[in-house]
Image (spheres, helix red, strand yellow):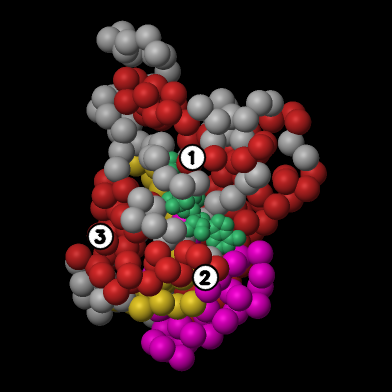
Amino acid sequence: MSGKRGVIMGVANNRSIAWGIAKAVRAQGAEVALTYQGDALKKRVEPLAAELGGVLAGHCDVADEASIDAVFENLEKMWGKIDFLVHAIGFSDKDELTGRYVDTSAENFAKTMQISVYSFTSVARRAEKLMTDGGSMLTLTYYGAEKVMPNYNVMGVAKAALEASVKYLAVDLGPKNIRVNAISAGPIKTLAASGIGDFRYILKWNEYNAPLRRTVTIEDVGDVGLYMLSDLARSVTGEVHHADSGYHVVGMKAVDAPDI
Ligand code: NAD
């Protein structure tokens, strides 16, 4: 990754998946710029950027188009061009990440779609302009897009839309040698995940039933991210790559899985 520069959006703290990816690409020589959402997170993200010898690209609330513009103006001033973009952002009202999907409100449906789906398209459009030598864009999704997971509700519907947008973006941007992919990560205990009802149960279920009999770490996902962002994946675009200890291939409870 030496000589490559990119922006990583979605670091909240050192448990964030985006942080796992940032560490992995930095370890292979990439230069990274991190964004943060608001002053409270700036305090956490600033020392993390420093730890990587990276920089801050500024505050970015993806619900505010002006703040997205400001970040990409900063990147253009700083570097002129970028080689990669990581979008590890999702949000839904936690009161609706429990109970029945059918009870989702119109307001939260729209908000979840805006923050968790449209924002990737919105940042991709800006990043395209700076990827003058081609590039790689990556977002994060979850198996709840493909199969119904308890309490994941509107986030599952949003992730399905996000995975579809990965394919549309891959087709739009492919002729410029810009690749667009997603990692479908297994469950990890992060700030965002703590909003999902009964998350500990989902973690245990995955640990007992995934082919590898373990959950994944941000370092596991970080290494898959490194591959996707590097030239090793130069022929890969429009892909949703599972990094979930193989959980997505399982059809039934494992024979040796304890009851939980
Ligand atoms: P996290 O809480 O560490 O990261 C979520 C990030 O989203 C935070 O940095 C937060 O600031 C950002 N964000 C939320 N609303 C925003 C807004 N309006 N503007 C800008 N940023 C905003 O949690 P995480 O689990 O690392 O989540 C990263 C991504 O990974 C999300 O898309 C999540 O859905 C996805 N994912 C998580 C898991 C898991 O189990 N943790 C599994 C698969 C996919």
Q: Secondary structure at mark 3?
A: helix
Q: Is residue 15 left or right of residue 122?
A: left
Q: Are marks 1 and 2 in contact (CB under 8 Å)?
A: no
Determine the residue positioned at 38% across, 72% down: 46
Determine the residue positioned at 41% across, 88% down: 78
Circle 1 residues within 10 Å: few <14, some 14–19, many ≥20:
few
Give the label, 3 or 1, closer to the camera. Answer: 1
Q: Is residue 210 visible?
A: no
Q: Is residue 226 left or right of residue 86?
A: left
Q: Which residues are magenta?
A: 59-88
Tell me the CA gap for discs 3 and 2.
26 Å
Q: Secondary structure at mark 2?
A: helix
Against 18, residue 104 (above or below) is above
The residue beneath circle 3 is: 24
- Quadrant location of the N terminus in the rendered image: bottom left
Q: Amino acid at mark 2?
A: Asp
Circle 2 residues within 10 Å: few <14, some 14–19, many ≥20:
few
Determine the residue positioned at 40% across, 67% down: 45
Q: Are marks 3 and 2 in contact (CB under 8 Å)?
A: no
Q: Which mark is residue 151?
A: none
Q: Which mark is residue 194?
A: 1
Give residue 47's position: percent from left, percent from top. Answer: 33, 70
Against 253, residue 197 (above or below) is below
Whichever of labels 3 and 2 marks the residue nearer the N terminus, that label is 3
The residue beneath circle 2 is: 39
Give residue 138's position: percent from left, percent from top. Answer: 43, 59
Circle 3 residues within 10 Å: few <14, some 14–19, many ≥20:
many
